[in-house]
Amino acid sequence: MRMCNFDDDAANAMAAMITRIQSQYKRASITFDCEMNTGLDSEVVKVLKKNEANDLLEEMAEHHLDALESRRRALEAKETESRLNGFFGEDDTEESDYFFGNDESYDDNYDPYDNYEY
C-alpha cells in the first residue's frame, strides 16, 4: 500500500481497523506502509507503520467512527422521510398526468354524454 493515493479518510478507516483488531486480538500485529502517499501527513504515516496504541491513532479511528455514525443517521433520516412520504402519499399529479397522456386541460368532471340530446 505504498502508493495507493490514500487520503485522510482512508487513513482514518485503517486506524479504526487497527484499533479494533488490537482491542479484540491482543496478539495481532497490523501495520501499513503508506510512505509514498503524498496526501498523508508524515505523522500519520508513522502511526500507521507502527504497531502500537497511540493518541493520534485513537483520534483518527474516532473520527472515522463519527463519520460512519453521521452517515448512518443520515440514511436513517432519509428512510424515515421516505416511509412518511409513502404513508401520507406525495402529490405527483403532474407527473402521473403526463405519464397517462393527459394534459393540463383535462377536466375531471367531463362526461361524454353532457352534450347528448335525448
Image (cartoon, rainbow, N blue to C red):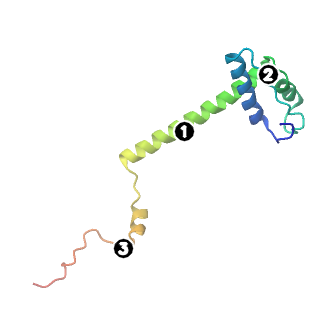
The CA span between labels 1 and 3 is: 40 Å
Q: Nearer the viewer, mark 3 or mark 2?
A: 2
Q: Which residue: 86% across, 37% down?
A: 2
Q: Which mark is residue 105?
A: 3
Secondary structure beneath label 2: helix
Horizontal and vertical percent position of residue 70? 61, 33
Disc 3, disc 2: CB below 8 Å?
no
Secondary structure beneath label 3: loop
Q: Which residue: 78% across, 18% down?
A: 55
Q: Quadrant of residue 42?
A: top right
Give the camera-side residue of 25 and 105: 25
**Mark earlier in primary sequence (3, 2):** 2
Question: Given the image, on which type of amino acid does mark 2 rest?
Answer: Leu
Residue bearing mark 2: 56
Looking at the image, residue 77 sits to the left or right of residue 89; the answer is right
Disc 1, disc 2: CB below 8 Å?
no
Q: Quadrant of residue 74?
A: top right
Question: Given the image, on which type of amino acid does mark 1 rest?
Answer: Leu
Residue bearing mark 1: 75
The CA span between labels 1 and 2 is: 29 Å
